[in-house]
Structures are given as C-alpha cells and as structure tokens.
Image (spheres, grey):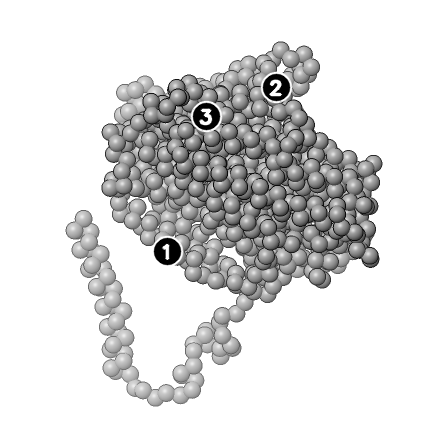
C-alpha cells in the first residue's frame, strides 16, 4: 500500500513540476509587449463573438434523449455476453475435462477447482442448450428495442428538419375530433 | 442456484412454463403495447382506433387474472370457468401452486393475485373512461395507452415483488410512465409545471430509496425478501440491535430511506408536496389513476416489505418491530389529519380530491401500522390474547386494508370520472361552477353523492365497512401498545371533520340554483357516460350492503400471506 | 470495503445537497444521478467484498438503465416546461397553489 502511495506521490510531484517549470521559465524569459490582439481570448484563430454560455438548439436535446435510451440498453448485453461466451466455449465437445471444469468455474464465478470438487461441471449438451436459449432471449429483447426505434423513426422524431407541412395538414383534418379534448385546456389557460 | 440447476429446472424443467403461465396477463399487456405501436406505425389507427386495441388488451389481461383468481380460490373444478382455464392453460402445478417463480424474483400467492385482479379491473375501467371522455386524441392515443399500460405492468410486478431488485424495478416502472402521463397535455402550462415538480421530487425519492436498498441488502448480505427477517435475527442475535452498534444504525437508516421512498409513492406527510400539484395540473383521469392504482401498488410493496422485515418475531428484535409500527402509526395520523385540514380550504375539485387522497392514504397506513405492531408483539406480554388470537388479529388488519383498497378503487375512480365528465360539459373543475348541477345532470350528481358519502364513511356504503374494519383493527392493536388507541382517536375525529368539506361540494351541487348564463351540462341517464358512472357507483353500494363475500376473500388472502 | 462505502456516502451527501440547493431543474437531476451512482458503488462494493454476490452487480446494471430512462423522461419534461415557460428555474414553477 505504501509503495503504491509513494508512486502516486512521485507522479503528482513530477507532473506538477513539469507543468509549472516551463510556465515559470517562460514568465521570466519572455518580453512583455501587449497589444489588443494579443490580449484577446484565443479561439481557434477566429475573433471571439459573444459569450460561450449560449443556449444550444433544442433539437440537440431530443436527439440526445433518444440516444441515451438506446445507448444504455446495451448495458444489458454485458451479463448476457459473459454467459453466452462461456456457454459457447463449453458447448465444444472436444474440450478436455480440466479445461471444462476451469471454464465452468469461470462461468459460475467460483474459485478455481470448486466445480470439479463439487461435481457441477457443465456438460456440452447443457451448455449448447444454454447458448441457444441465450440467443433467443437476446433476440426477443433486441426486437422489442427495434420496435421502439422503428416507432420513433416513423414518427419523425429523428428528422433534423421535421416536415411541419404534413403535420399541419394532419392536424387540420383532426381538429374536429380533437375539439373535445382541447377545449378544457384552452378555457383553463384563459382563466 | 448453480448453472446446472438453472439449466435443469429453469430452462428445461418446470420453472419456465410455470412462470410464463403465471405471468401470462402481464405478457398479454406487453403485447398490447407492441400492438398499439404497430397500429400507429402502419397508419391503420383511423380504421382501428388505438383506444379499442388498448381496451381489448386490458380485457384479455383481466380475464387472465380473473381465471387465475378463480383457480386459486376454487380449484380447477368450477364448471362455468372451464373454458377460461383451458384458454389460459392453467395447471395445478402452475397457477395452482403458491410460491416464488422466475427463480425467486417474483412470488405467486393469493395476495398478489388479489391485487393484480384489482389493478386489471381498474385498468379496464380507466381505459373505458378515457374512451368516453376522449382525453388522448386519436393521433396521440397510442402514446397515452402505452404509458398507462406500462405503468400498470409495473404495479402488477409490485404486487408480486419477492426480491429487492423487483421492488426497485416496480417502483420505477410504475412512476416513470406516470411522470410522462401528468405532462401529457402538451400545450398546457399547468400540466408541464405539475409534471416537472412530480418528476423532480419523484426522482429524488427514488434515488434515496435506492441508496437505502443498497444499505439494507449490503448489511444483511441478501436481496431476497423472504430471507431478510432471518438475516436480521442472525445478524443481531442476542439483542445487539441497539443504537450504539454501527451496523444496526446503518440498517435502520437503510430501512428508513426505503420507507421514505415508498412514502413518497403513497404521498404521506412529509413527502406529499407533489400530490396536489400533480393532480391539479394533470387531467382528472390521470389523477384518478395516480390516486388509486399507484397507491395500491405502493401499498402492496409496503406490506410485502414490512412482512419481510417482521416475518420472524425474535424477542430480541421486538424493539425494531415496535418502533417501525409506531413510526408508521405517527406518519398515518399526521397524514390523515393534514390531508383533511388542507382539503377544507380548497376551491378546485381536483385539488380537494388530491388532499382527500392524502387523507385516505393515512387511514390505510393505519391498518399497516396495526399489522406491524400486532405481528411484532410477544404473545405473553399481551393480557387476554393468545398466539393464535394475535394471528387472527393480524389477519383482520390485512383484511381491513384489502377491503379498504377494493372499495377505494370504485369510490375514488367514480369521483374522478365524474369530475372528468363534468369538465367535458362545463369546461371547469372549480367547485363554484358546480352550483346547481343536480338539476341538469342528476345521474352524475347522485353518483357523486354516493362516492363522496362513501369516502366519508357513512353507512350503508362500502366506505363505512372499510373504515369500521380499520378502526376495529386499530382497537385490537391498542391492546398491544396504547399508542394505537391514540391513533384510533385521531382517525375518528378526522372522519367527522372530513364530512364538512365533502358536504360543501354536495351543497354546491344540490342546494344552490344554477347561475344564469352558466354552461349547461346535460348528461342523461341513458347515455354512455351516465351508464358508466352508475356502473362504477353501484359496487360502492353493493359492498356496503353485502360486505360478507369480499371480506371473507380478503381474510383468506391474509391467512395465506401471513402463514 | 470501508473506503468504497465512504466514497459512496460522499457521493450520496453531495447529491442530496445538490438536490436541496439547486434552483435549476437540470441541476437537481444531476444531484439525483449522483445519489444513484453512490448507491451503485455501494452495490458493487457489497458484491465484491460482502455477501451480496452477483445480485449486487445485476442490481447496479439495472440501476444504470433505469437511471437513464428516468433522466430521459425528466429531461423531456424539463424541455416541455421550458417550451411553455421559457425557464427551467424550479422556483418559477409556482402557478399551482392553494
């Protein structure tokens, strides 16, 4: 532990020195001749326009929201991938007994040698069954996500420029049906 | 469970078919969600309205749970139900057998079937109401019903939660869609404000609850709920559950945080801020859904969690049980009092019903606190009660809660439905604008009278028996600890007080003249809305006159759960 | 294990402070994320050094996904609020009062 700590300390000290020393040397050595151009904020060589704290276009947020949801679903693939990988390796009937018991230990998250001792080595047929079930499982899961994705796509939430014309025409056609639902909202807003 | 066992029993053997059989109604609901999305995707929603698809799916799921209910209750020998049993493929070793399924994540027993039946019935009634009141228009119908059904599936998971993971998953699954449902009317300023408040408080509560769950699961070394009580007794054997023991403090903190998260769902004081705002900003239909279904789901979770903690009454842990029970009792008394006091000054009908919802959550929590107190009691310490007597009283407490929830489903849904239907006519939800409505829409007003009187607890309505059972169980719990008698007194005073604000609404409806120039609200008896409100109010009356069958069923449910 | 639990507790307290003091709706949600991640560290620590086993790891995976779903819904609602009110200051959300 102290060894590790020493490493970290050395690393921190060396890092700080390597950053601070050139800055100090530069400060001592360089000439000091300020002009307005030199004093302005450096932004890729362009003159800076306004503050950088501006509001992003709201469309970024919509795309970001959809991205988060579909991105994070991948987290469920991790446990599946470990089990599926272990199962496909075990499904190979040519494995030696030692390799089989080692892989079983890995799949079960046990200390090496436990499954051989307690007779829980997974047979090739069982592992194949497990792998097949895993494929079906993940296919169903992924199909559900794809349906959601297709729905979002179809509704036009992914289009950068939404075609508002067709939407307007649709809403014109529907005003008659939507009157009942809309009217309370309008009266409450007025009051 | 090792991999070999999982492969043998779960995948090849009996666990998977049994689980799928029990989980059938939930799967049907999920498929309904898919169907809704497909209907909209292929643009056939003009010919096949999404609300009909949703109604059909909910009905199928309801039939599924109903057949499970009858199967569990009466066995496979009911001739009239044979076709239904066969259609759902129910078998004695599947639905007929009580116990955990999906390798212990969920549990199948009378309690969960009872709650799921209520939730499915509520879902059907709710979708029928939205069809009548037209709250989601035909372009957005699938979004609304997807959220509604998704939330219901979450609640049905909550009823069978047998693992802390399922508990958290269920809480999130029932609350995340309801945040979006509150914000559903896009253009309304109030709706978006209500939803923002709800989502911020809700997300905070969920975070705190999860931290509490991590502490509980970590300290006890298990996340399976049936094992919690045993772990508590082994971890703190010999009376080491004291405040000087850091592990005990951590566990107590964790339990407190979990209860805080559940209290948020139940809108108990001091976690009630969101409730009136969310109800006022959301449509009345959504308010009805939040006040009945999400309360029922949260109560199911609370009962399961409390029973898991107090399941194994070790004398050295009596302190834990007693302080849990008294803490719940204090929260219940404060909640009921606060809800009733705040409701008194409301002018908006939805806000009034929101505070009334808070008050009713308080009454129902009283039954849970009585249950915890009685279960934690030492039989030798209570004069005049044997161990068997204590068990019977514990059953009575749970029976009272179940009965109350069943009546509450109808009476609160009725009240919110009438608010929604009146809104469609006069475009207002202020109590002032309800003046003299009885002359124009007598059906709605009479049904409102039934629902509100039942909410007060006047005989001969369902609410009367429900309150009476809760008061009786509080009285019995008072024999274990005197504090429950204090709670009983507070509850009785509250009941009298609540009469006044409900009466104000009724006075405005029945005893004043309709102002000149007000919008008319003609809802005849022979119309779909009229028949709907009658259909919802009649059970309130029936449960008042014929309390026997339901309370017998509830007692049976309680007996199996507490065994 | 205590070191991990301490980090988790610090994250939890930071998150709760953030929720209590921030007036910006997005800031409150950041606090929530901190709390959830504190709980996640707890779960993983208990699963590695405690008795919780693989349950803890699965728990934290589910939490990651649920947190993302919750954040997405919350951000969508905040966006909706912004469209209607032109601000995300939660103190401005005060139209609904008795």
Check residue B517 in the rendering and tell me which mark sits there, or answer none: none
Q: x and y percent of residue B293 in the render?
A: 59, 38
Q: Quadrant of the N terminus of chain B?
A: top left
Crowd band around label 2 with a 10 angstrom C-alpha radius: few (<14), some (14–19), many (20+): some
Check residue B70 in the rendering and tell me which mark sits there, or answer none: 2
**SS under mark 1:** helix
Q: Earlier in the sequence, mark 3 or mark 2?
A: 2
- Between tags 3 and 1, which lies in front? 3
Question: Position of B367 compared to A109: left or right?
Answer: right
Q: x and y percent of residue C61 in the render?
A: 43, 41
Q: Please say whether residue A5 is visible from this viewpoint.
A: yes
Viewer-nearest residue: A11 or A99: A11
Label 2 to label 1: alpha-carbon separation: 51 Å
- Above/below status of B429 relative to A73: below
Label 3 to label 2: alpha-carbon separation: 25 Å
Q: Quadrant of residue B416?
A: top right
Mark 3 sits on what residue? B394
Q: Residue at x 29, y 46 (%)?
A: C4
Viewer-nearest residue: B70 or B445: B445
Mark 1 sits on what residue? C14
Q: Are marks 2 and 1 on the same chain?
A: no
Crowd band around label 3 with a 10 angstrom C-alpha radius: few (<14), some (14–19), many (20+): many
- Between tags 3 and 2, which lies in front? 3
Question: Position of B73 compared to B241: left or right?
Answer: right
State if disc 1 and disc 2 touch (CB < 8 Å).
no
Q: x and y percent of residue B356 in the render?
A: 59, 44
Question: Position of A189 compared to B262: left or right?
Answer: right
Q: Please say whether residue B2 is visible from this viewpoint.
A: no
């Amino acid at each position: 532990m102290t060894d590790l700590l020493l490493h970290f300390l050395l690393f921190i000290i060396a890092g700080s020195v390597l950053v601070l020393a050139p800055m100090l040397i530069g400060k001592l050595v360089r000439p000091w001749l300020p002009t307005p151009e030199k004093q302005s904020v450096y932004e890729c060589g362009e003159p800076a326009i306004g503050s950088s704290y501006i509001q992003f276009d709201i469309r970024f947020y919509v795309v970001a929201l959809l991205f988060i949801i579909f991105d994070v679903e991948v987290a469920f693939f991790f446990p599946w991938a470990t089990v599926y990988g272990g199962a496909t390796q075990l499904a190979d009937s040519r494995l030696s007994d030692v390799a089989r018991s080692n892989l079983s230990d890995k799949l079960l998250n046990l200390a090496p040698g436990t499954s051989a001792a307690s007779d829980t080595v997974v047979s090739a047929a069982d592992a194949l069954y497990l792998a097949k079930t895993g494929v079906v499982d993940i296919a169903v899961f992924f199909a559900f996500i794809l349906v959601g994705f297709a729905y979002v796509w179809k509704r036009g939430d992914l289009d950068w420029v939404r075609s508002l014309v067709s939407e307007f025409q649709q809403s014109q056609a529907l005003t008659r049906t939507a009157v009942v639902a809309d009217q309370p909202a309008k009266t409450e807003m007025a009051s | 469970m090792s991999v070999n066992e999982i492969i043998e029993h779960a995948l090849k053997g009996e666990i998977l078919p049994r689980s799928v059989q029990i989980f059938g109604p939930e799967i049907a609901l999920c498929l309904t969600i898919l169907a809704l999305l497909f209907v909209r995707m292929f643009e056939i929603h003009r010919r096949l309205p999404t609300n009909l698809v949703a109604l059909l799916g909910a009905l199928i799921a309801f039939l599924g749970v109903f057949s499970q209910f009858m199967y569990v209750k009466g066995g496979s020998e009911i001739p009239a139900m044979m076709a239904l049993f066969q259609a759902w493929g129910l078998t004695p070793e599947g639905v007929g057998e009580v116990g955990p399924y999906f390798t212990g994540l969920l549990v199948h027993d009378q309690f969960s079937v009872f709650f799921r039946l209520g939730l499915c019935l509520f879902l059907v009634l709710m979708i029928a109401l939205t069809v009548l009141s037209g709250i989601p228009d035909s372009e957005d119908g699938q979004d609304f019903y997807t959220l509604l059904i998704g939330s219901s599936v979450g609640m049905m998971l909550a009823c069978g939660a047998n693992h802390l993971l399922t508990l958290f998953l269920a809480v999130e699954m029932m609350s995340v869609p309801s945040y979006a449902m509150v914000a559903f009317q896009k253009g309304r300023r109030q709706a978006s404000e209500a939803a923002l408040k709800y989502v911020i408080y809700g997300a905070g509560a969920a975070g705190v609850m999860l931290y509490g769950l991590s502490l509980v699961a970590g300290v006890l070394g298990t996340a399976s709920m049936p094992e919690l009580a045993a772990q508590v007794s082994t971890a703190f054997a010999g009376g080491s559950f004291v405040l000087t023991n850091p592990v005990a403090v951590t566990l107590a903190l964790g339990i407190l945080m979990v209860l805080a998260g559940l209290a948020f769902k139940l809108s108990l004081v001091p976690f009630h801020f969101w409730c009136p705002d969310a109800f006022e900003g959301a449509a009345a239909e959504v308010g009805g859904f939040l006040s009945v279904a999400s309360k029922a789901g949260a109560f199911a979770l609370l009962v399961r969690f409390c029973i898991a903690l107090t399941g194994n009454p070790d004398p050295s842990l009596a302190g834990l049980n007693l302080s849990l029970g008294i803490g719940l009792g204090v929260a219940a008394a404060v909640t009921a009092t606060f809800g009733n006091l705040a409701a008194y000054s409301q002018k908006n009908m939805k806000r009034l019903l929101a505070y009334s919802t808070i008050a009713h959550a308080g009454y129902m929590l009283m039954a849970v606190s009585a249950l915890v107190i009685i279960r934690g009691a030492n039989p030798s310490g209570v004069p005049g009660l044997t161990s068997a007597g204590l068990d019977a009283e514990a059953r009575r407490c749970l029976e009272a809660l179940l009965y109350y929830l069943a009546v509450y489903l109808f009476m609160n849904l009725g009240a919110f439905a009438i608010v929604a239907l009146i809104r469609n006519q006069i475009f207002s939800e202020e109590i002032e604008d309800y003046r003299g409505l009885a002359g124009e829409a007598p059906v709605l007003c009479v049904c409102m009278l039934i629902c509100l009187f039942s909410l007060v607890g006047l005989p001969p309505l369902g609410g009367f028996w429900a309150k009476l059972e809760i008061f009786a169980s509080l009285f019995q719990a008072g024999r274990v600890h005197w504090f429950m008698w204090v709670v009983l007194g507070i509850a009785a005073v509250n009941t009298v007080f609540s009469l006044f604000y409900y009466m104000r609404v009724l006075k405005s409806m029945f005893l004043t003249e309709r102002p000149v120039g007000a919008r008319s609200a003609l809802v005849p008896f022979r119309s779909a809305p009229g028949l709907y409100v009658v259909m919802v109010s009649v059970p309130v009356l029936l449960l008042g006159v014929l309390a026997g069958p339901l309370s017998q069923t509830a007692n049976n449910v309680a007996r199996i759960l507490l065994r | 294990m205590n070191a991990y639990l301490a980090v988790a507790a610090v994250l939890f307290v930071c998150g709760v402070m953030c929720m209590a003091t921030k007036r910006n709706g997005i800031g409150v949600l950041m606090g929530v994320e901190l709390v959830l991640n504190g709980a996640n560290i707890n779960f993983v620590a208990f699963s590695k050094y405690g008795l919780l086993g693989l349950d803890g790891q699965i728990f934290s995976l589910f939490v990651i996904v649920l947190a993302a779903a919750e954040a997405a819904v919350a951000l969508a609602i905040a966006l909706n609020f912004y469209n209607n009110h032109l601000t995300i200051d939660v103190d401005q959300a005060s139209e609904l009062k008795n």
